[in-house]
Amino acid sequence: MSRVPRSTELYERAKSLIPGGTQLVSRRPSRFAEGTSPVYAVRGKGARIWDVDGNEYIDWASGIAAIILGYCDPVVDDAVREQIGRGVNFSISSELEVELAEELTRTIPCAEMVRYTKCGGEACTVAVRIARGVTGRDKVLFCGYHGWHDWYLAANLDAGGSLDAHLLPGIEPIGVPRGLAGTSIPFPYGDLAALGEALDRNRGEVACVIMEPLRSQLPPEGYLAGVQKLCREHGAVLIFDEVSAGFRFGMECAQGFVSVVPDMAVLAKSVSNGYPMGLVVGRRDVMAPAARMFISSTYWSDAIGLIATLTTIRELRRRRTAEYVAEFGARLQTRLNQTAAEVGIDVHCGGLAVHPHLHLPGKDATERKLLTTLYIQEMAKRGCHGYASFYLNGAQGDAELEQTATAARETFALMRRGLDEGSLTSLVESKLQDEPFQRLVR
Ligand SMILES: Cc1ncc(COP(=O)(O)O)c(C=O)c1O
C-alpha cells in the first residue's frame, strides 16, 4: 500500500500537462525515492512540511535551500501580509528598492550598487550581461551550477570528452543557439593552473569568471585569492555565484567567510525565506555602466520580494542564524556519525557544518545508488524528507535532531543488513534515485 497515493496520482496528471513534470529538476520525484517520498506539499511550518497524503516531514532540503529562517516565519510573513495590504506592484517604484539597496551596501562586502531579479539563474544572467557589457568581451569561464539560461547551457554545445567533469554531462542543449558554441567554458574547481591556462587560451576575450566560491567543503588554501589575482591580470570580472551559499555563511555572506571580495556577486536562496527574489551586487565601477544596458523587468520591483528580503536579512542578523545553523549542523554531524558507529556501518556525515553531506559506502556506483535510494526511502517513512545531504534552517532544533537520529539508527541498521545479506535490491521499494547534477563545486 503506497504511503503517497495522492502525490503519485497528481504527478501522473502533471506529466501529461507539464513538460518535465515539475518546474525545477531538483523537485522531480526521481531525485528522491520515487513511490515513497512525497511529491506535493500542502503546507509548511518551521522545520516541517505536510504532503497531500497527510504525512508530516522534517524538510531537510529546506525548500531546496530557499528557506533559511523556517517555513512561515512569523516576522517575515507579518511584514509580507502588511505589504499585501498596501499593494505589491505599482506603476511607479517602491521606496523599499532604495531601503533594501542601502541595507545591502552596508552589509555585503562587494556591494556598492545593486540590481534585483526574481530568482537565482536570472540574477546570474544579469551579472554575466553586465560583465560582457562592461568589458566588451563575449566569453565566460564558469565553475558551478548557474541555472538554465542560454549563456550557461551553451557550454554543452561543445560536448565531448571536455564535458565529462561538467555539471550537466549528457544534457543536450536543445534550443540553445548553436552560434553560442565556444562562448561558455567550464573550469575545474581548486585548480589554479587550469584556470590560468583557460584564461591564456582565451586571452583578451574573457568577460568574466563566474563561480560558486564554495558549497560544502572549504576551498584549498589561497585558491580563491589566486582566482582573483588571475582575473585582475586578465581584465576579467570575478563574479561569485552565492545563490545557494549567501547568508548561510554569515552576514558578510560566503565572500566574507572566505575573505575574498569579488567584483560582483549574485544571491537568491538565502535572502528572502522562500519569497521570489534575486540580487546582483557589485563594485560601483562594474555595476554603474549597467545604467546604459537594457536590463529591465516589471516584476523585479515587486514589493513582496523587497519586504521579504529586508525583513529576512534583519532577522538573520538579529537571530544570528548563520552561527546557530553552523553549531546545529556540527551537532547533527556528530549525532549521525555516532549513530553510524553504533550500528557498525561505514557512513560518514562530513562537509562544512553549515551544509552536511552523508558519504555512503558501496563497492561500486550501482551499490551506492541502491544505498542512497534506501536511505532516502527509509528516512521518508520515518518523517525525514531530503537527499543524502542537509540544507539547514533556523527553525530546526532538538526535536528535529532527535527524530532524525532515531530514524537514522533504524535506516542505517537496514542498510547494514542489506549490505551484509546482499539483499539491498529487495529492500529498495522505490524507483532508483537519479542524480542529474554532477557538481563542479562540492
Ligand atoms: C549556485 C546556484 N546558482 C544558480 C542557481 C539557480 O537559481 P534558480 O533556481 O533560483 O534560478 C542555483 C539553484 O540551485 C544555485 O544553487
Image: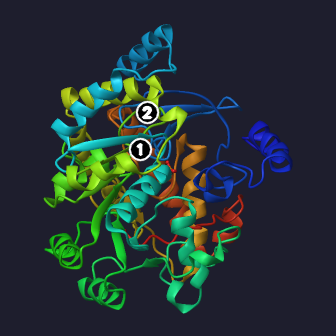
**Pointer 1: what residue?**
269
Determine the residue located farthest toward the front in the rendered image.
292
The structure residue drawn at horizontal position 21% and vertical position 54%, both measured from the top left corner, is 285
- Please provide percent x and percent y for residue 277: 44, 37
Q: Quadrant of the C terminus?
A: bottom left
- Please provide percent x and percent y for residue 309: 36, 30
Mark 2 Cα shell of 10 Å, populated few (<14), some (14-19), many (≥20): many
- Viewer-proximal residue among 149 and 343: 149
Measured Cα–Cα span from mark 2 to mark 1: 16 Å
Tell me the amino acid under the disc marked 1. Lys
Q: How many marks?
A: 2
Q: Viewed as shown, does residue 352 lie left or right of 306?
A: left
Q: Viewed as shown, does residue 12 lie left or right of 271?
A: right
Disc number placed over residue 47 in the picture, else none: 2
Q: Viewed as shown, does residue 368 lie left or right of 22?
A: left
Q: Secondary structure at mark 1?
A: loop
* Residue 71 in which image quadrant: top left
Disc number placed over residue 153 in the picture, else none: none
- Against 257, residue 310 (above or below) is above
- Viewer-proximal residue among 22 and 240: 240
* Residue 366 in which image quadrant: bottom right
